[in-house]
Amino acid sequence: AMHAIAVRDLCELVGQMSTTLAKLGVPHRIISPNTVIREIVQLHMRATGRSYHDASARVAVAGVDTLVRRDDLAWAERVTLWVCDEGHHLLKSNKWGKALARFPNARGLGVTATPVRADGKGLGRHADGLMDTMVLGPETRDLIDAGKLSRLTNRSPTWERFSGLTAWTGPRDGVCLHDRPPGLAKPACFSAR
């Protein structure tokens, strides 16, 4: 019997994954601290009217940091499939590699919209990563032309509005402005990608 686990990096994203499984009617384990499990069960209740958390289910969701810290992973050898979004994070030497190494009998699926790392490290097993094969999906323009995505409208501020502001590189590889330009309600973060 297949045992599968989906792994994410933030508690909020683990909750989103779990709620999506609940909406699909899939019972699953939530591998997180008890307080997080209770919060996620409340999300299930609001979304579906019941909890889909089942501590003995063959499907699980977990946060990468929880997997790295936990010692009670005897069940990990039964996992035959792991799935990770943001697959460009998956390197042998980082927390993702350490977490996924706990599933020695599993095959993996890492998906990402950005299969190139800013630090130049490779995603393939022959380099720094965990992947054996890369499959390229359709380009954004092809999906728009096929009616699968909405047409894009790019609305960006003129850079003159931001001149003289102090910027820093944030933990999510974005640039955040400390001071608000006129007309912005909150500090702004812009993706570096």
Image (cartoon, grey):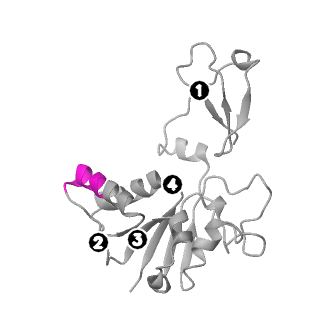
Which of disc 2 and disc 3 is earlier in sequence? 2
Which secondary structure dominates the residues rendered in magenta? helix
Query: Where does the magenta region start and end?
Result: 41-49
- Which residue is label 2 attached to? 54
Q: x and y percent of residue 61 in the render?
A: 42, 66
Front-most of residues 17 and 166 = 166
Which amino acid does the dot numbered 1 rest on? Pro
Count neighbours of disc 1 (C-alpha within 10 A) and say few if under 14, some if 14 to 19, many if 20 or more: few
40 w.r.t. 108: above or below: above
Which amino acid does the dot numbered 3 rest on? Ala
Q: x and y percent of residue 31 in the render?
A: 42, 68
- Which residue is label 4 attached to? 10
Front-most of residues 105 and 145 = 105
136 displayed left or right of 118: left
Which of disc 4 and disc 3 is earlier in sequence? 4
Can you tell which quarter of the image residue 112 is in?
bottom right
Who's the residue at 31% across and 58% down the image?
A: 38
124 w.r.t. 182: above or below: below
Q: x and y percent of residue 132 in the render?
A: 67, 75
- Which residue is label 3 attached to? 60
Q: Secondary structure at mark 4?
A: loop
Q: Quadrant of the N terminus?
A: bottom left
Mark 3 and mark 4 residues within 8 Å of each other at the beta carbon: no
Q: Is residue 42 magenta?
A: yes
Which amino acid does the dot numbered 2 rest on? Asp
Which of disc 4 and disc 2 is earlier in sequence? 4
